[in-house]
DNA sequence: CTTTGGATT
DNA sequence: AATAAATCCAAAG
């Protein structure tokens, strides 16, 4: 319901999260301390609490493990990671898409609002919708007493004895929701509803069409009541966060410029981001990460401590990236029924309950014409410990009998496992998953058709009578074709943008933007030309050890880089000397000496924040060793801002570069806002001086030079030398891998078959594509 | 494939 | 007296 994150249960009350409880002192209501006290009193000693403590211990253990892992990380590993992460970050940065306008609509205290509308007497009173056991939402009066969604009603009553708890009327909410959705559909017929009270809209197209409308018609956009919060931003992640800030009229916009995004992200606590919950927050906190800035700063470390999809996700968040297209809801993956009750410990009752649940599930499945192969039961005992047990059968089933036959066995093994003690249950659930996919269904249909055509009227043993309608099957193949990799997608999104100049609204900005990228591209292609003869001896600078590799072939160079990257200690000897003259290239140090982008703009006014200059000088003369140690250990020293071009920050800082002075000019800027006034930048790959002084463009050059350039040259050399040397393949692989383009280990989940669905969770949406 | 767990509403 | 239900995804075994 409410997407405020400080809602939840007592634990959030325990976590003294500053500034989040918007409890205006005075008037009616309670202050935070009192609220916490009451909640604790009601909670302490309960079985629920016991389980919470247990879970908390588990999380602490996880954190401890993580910290131990962290302690093992060498500065070498960290540097290597930094390179890879930064290269990936550059890729992301290059694909940043600010061309969409995404709106996240969130209806404030929706259920409560509906109840108040239908019963005005409730308007001035504290109310909540739900039951004594659990509340779905509360109105603002109630919130002053600390009454929140996901709080049990009996605790809410202690916080606010006058509280009126209204039982939910979901049918009514659905009806109201439908009305609202009809309105939303006018702005985006493909909007994505997340629940009854929440939706994303992509109004990009609508805004365009609207341009041609007559003045009077254009005047009204979405009529605003007080009951809606709207976040407007270039992607879903940001829009969602925005809708939490109900700025002027319940509406908050991040304008589509990179700097606006970065300003917004800067101090944003990661917990505000959808996908980062309590546990992740705590784990990251253990690493000193609270805000997105810190999340970015620790990106290399994170890539070593977390799974690939996790750190990819983190990096997206840290860069203010999110999905820009609202994928149509995919097929559902599972369907389940579960129920909480007061203790049931009689085995017979447990079985009959199980049967009931199976019957319910079967009905629900049949409503959607679904059949599945995996049956999972879920059991929660009176100590709130949860167990699930699953079993997959060879052919899809959907009837109550078939499901129960499977569920019963699962339950039986649990009963016998615990016997003679009976299971003391407080919840039981049954879930069906592994739904038959297109192919299966077609097969089934064909066989059924064949069956019928053969004049046979028998039914299959599993009773697959009702199958999916043809309609759904005909629709599916369309979705199939939409499955592209994340990069494919991004590419195709970008292609038109590369040709047309990016359409930014403000003309002044545009002038700058429109011309530069193409010039940069021209330059890059020039530089490729000059280094075309790939296997001629050249001078490269290794992006790992930063030593010049003079007079070697590209192939040899790549081998060198491989060695540097792979062997943690192989290039040990190169560490010291090369740093001495190319210290600016030290990755560990880079974070320190890099100019904090965000810091460079004052709060809204373009003021200069004091301190970043000091940081530079402060870290300038530190020994590289110290810096890299620091990077491993306590990584965020005071005043460390985002490294230079955050994410676009090229890991390969040119030798001799001194990124010292940033332009202080801070007028409205388009997406390219790091202008370096200083020496020319030398690409460490092609070794050519780049005329541009814009770090973004420079980094793009370097990256392209590194990835595509070398790959291209390798291809050329393949052609030229007919026979392909073995080493080059490996190097190519490495480069691809480093830039995050290799195929990842396939998904372990069933999605690998031929499901063409799009998850809705933004995190997974993004990560899914990297697989 | 199974189990657990995190996350969202 | 009393802390939900439904869904997704990912990790690890």
Image (cartoon, coloured by chain):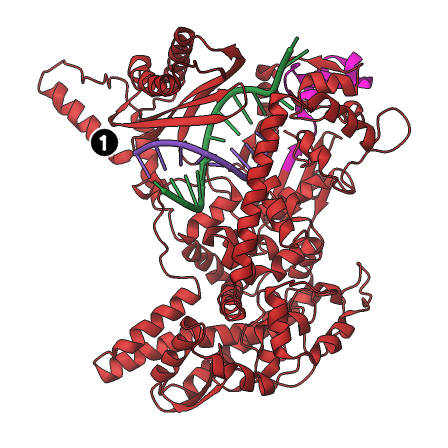
Chain colours: A red, B purple, C green
State the residue in front, A232 or A276: A276
Q: What element carries label 1?
A: helix
Q: Which residue lies furthest to the left in this view?
A: A454
Left or right of A125 in this view: A564: left
Q: Would you name the residue on which mark 1 appears?
A: A442
Q: Give above or below for A273 relative to A693.
A: above
Q: In which quarter of the image is the N terminus of chain A?
A: top right
Q: Where is residue A155 in the image (x, y as percent from the top left)?
A: 71, 19
Chain under callout 1: A
Q: Position of residue A279 (x, y in %)?
A: 59, 41
Q: Where is residue A122 in the image (x, y as percent from the top left)?
A: 78, 14
Q: Where is residue A21 in the image (x, y as percent from the top left)?
A: 77, 36
Whether residue A546 is visible here, answered yes or no, is no
**Residue A133 is one of the magenta-drawn residues:** yes
State the residue in front, A716 or A256: A716
Picture residue at 73% right of the left edge, 20% below the top? A156
Picture residue at 38% right of the left edge, 85% below the top? A532
Magenta extent: A105-134
Whether residue A510 is visible here, answered yes or no, is yes
Q: Which residue lies furthest to the front in this view?
A: A420
Picture residue at 48% right of the left edge, 45% below the top? A764
Q: Give above or below for A324 relative to A7.
A: below
Badge 1 crowding class, 10 Å Cα cut-off, few under 14, some 14 to 19, many 20 or more, is some
| Residue A601: quadrant of the picture | bottom right
Left or right of A146 in this view: A716: left
Picture residue at 62% right of the left edge, 85% below the top? A680
Q: How many marks?
A: 1
State the residue in front, A401 or A192: A401
| Residue A144: quadrant of the picture | top right
């Amino acid at each position: 319901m409410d997407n405020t994150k400080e809602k939840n249960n007592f634990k959030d009350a325990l976590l003294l999260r500053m500034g989040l409880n918007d409890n205006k002192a005075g008037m009616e209501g309670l202050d935070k301390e009192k609220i916490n006290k009451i909640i604790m009193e009601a909670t302490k000693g309960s079985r629920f609490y016991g389980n919470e403590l247990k879970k908390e211990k588990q999380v602490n253990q996880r954190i401890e493990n993580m910290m131990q892992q962290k302690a093992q990380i060498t500065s070498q590993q960290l540097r290597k990671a930094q390179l890879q992460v930064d290269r990936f970050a550059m890729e992301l940065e290059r694909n940043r898409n600010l061309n969409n306008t995404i709106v996240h609509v969130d209806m404030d205290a929706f259920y409560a609002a509906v109840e108040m509308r239908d019963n005005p007497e409730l308007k001035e009173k504290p109310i909540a919708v739900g039951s004594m056991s659990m509340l779905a939402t509360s109105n603002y009066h109630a919130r002053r007493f600390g009454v929140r969604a996901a709080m049990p009603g009996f605790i809410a009553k202690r916080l606010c004895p006058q509280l009126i708890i209204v039982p939910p009327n979901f049918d009514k909410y659905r009806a109201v929701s439908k009305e609202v959705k009809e309105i939303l559909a006018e702005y985006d017929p493909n909007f994505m509803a997340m629940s009854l009270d929440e939706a994303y809209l992509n109004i990009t197209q609508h805004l365009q069409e609207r341009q041609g409308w007559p003045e009077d018609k254009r005047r009204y956009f979405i009529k605003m009541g007080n009951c809606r919060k709207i976040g407007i931003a270039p992607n879903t992640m940001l829009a969602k966060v925005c809708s939490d800030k109900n700025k002027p009229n319940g509406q908050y916009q991040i304008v589509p410029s990179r700097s606006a995004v970065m300003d917004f992200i800067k101090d944003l606590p990661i917990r505000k981001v959808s996908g980062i919950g309590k546990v992740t927050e705590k784990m990251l906190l253990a690493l000193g990460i609270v805000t997105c800035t810190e999340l970015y700063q620790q990106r290399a470390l994170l890539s070593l401590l977390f799974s690939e999809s996790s750190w990819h996700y983190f990096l997206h968040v840290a860069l203010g990236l999110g999905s820009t297209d609202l994928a149509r809801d995919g097929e559902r993956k599972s369907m389940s029924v579960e129920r909480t009750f007061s203790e049931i410990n009689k085995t017979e009752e447990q079985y009959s309950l199980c049967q009931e649940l199976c019957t319910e599930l079967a009905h629900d499945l049949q409503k959607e014409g679904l059949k599945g192969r995996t049956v999972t039961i879920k059991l929660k005992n009176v100590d709130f410990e949860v167990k699930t047990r699953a079993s997959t059968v060879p052919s899809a089933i959907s009837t109550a009998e078939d499901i129960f036959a499977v569920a019963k066995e699962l339950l039986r093994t649990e009963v016998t496992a615990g016997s003679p003690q009976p299971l003391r249950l407080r919840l039981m659930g049954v879930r069906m998953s592994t739904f038959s996919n297109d192919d299966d269904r077609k097969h089934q249909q064909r066989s059924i058709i064949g069956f019928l055509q053969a004049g046979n009227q028998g039914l299959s043993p599993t009773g697959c009578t009702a199958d999916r309608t043809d309609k759904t099957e005909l629709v599916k193949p369309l979705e199939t074709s939409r499955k592209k990799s994340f990069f494919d997608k991004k590419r195709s999104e970008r292609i038109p943008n590369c040709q047309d100049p990016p359409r930014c609204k403000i003309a002044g900005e545009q002038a700058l933007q429109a011309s530069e990228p193409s010039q940069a591209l021209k330059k890059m292609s020039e530089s490729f030309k000059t280094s075309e003869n790939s296997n001629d001896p050249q001078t490269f600078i290794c992006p790992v050890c930063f030593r010049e590799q003079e007079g070697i072939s590209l192939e040899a160079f790549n081998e060198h880089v491989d060695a540097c990257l792979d062997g943690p200690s192989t290039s040990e000897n190169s560490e010291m000397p090369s740093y001495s003259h190319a210290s600016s290239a030290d990755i560990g140090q880079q974070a320190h000496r890099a100019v904090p982008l965000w810091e460079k703009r004052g709060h809204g006014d373009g003021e200069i924040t004091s301190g970043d200059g000091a940081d530079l000088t402060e870290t300038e003369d530190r020994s590289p060793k110290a810096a890299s140690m620091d990077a491993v250990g306590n990584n965020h020293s005071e005043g460390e801002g985002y490294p230079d071009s955050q994410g676009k920050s090229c890991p390969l800082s040119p030798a001799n570069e001194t990124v010292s002075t940033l332009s202080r000019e801070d007028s409205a800027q388009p997406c390219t806002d790091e202008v370096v006034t200083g020496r020319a930048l030398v690409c460490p790959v092609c070794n050519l001086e780049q005329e541009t002084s814009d770090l973004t463009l420079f980094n793009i050059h370097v990256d392209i030079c590194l990835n595509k350039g070398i790959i291209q040259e390798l291809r050329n050399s393949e052609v030229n030398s007919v026979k392909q040397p073995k080493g080059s393949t490996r190097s190519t692989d490495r480069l691809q891998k480093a830039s995050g383009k290799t195929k990842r280990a396939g998904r372990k989940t069933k999605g690998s078959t031929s499901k063409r669905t799009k998850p809705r969770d933004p995190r997974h949406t993004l990560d899914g594509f990297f697989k």
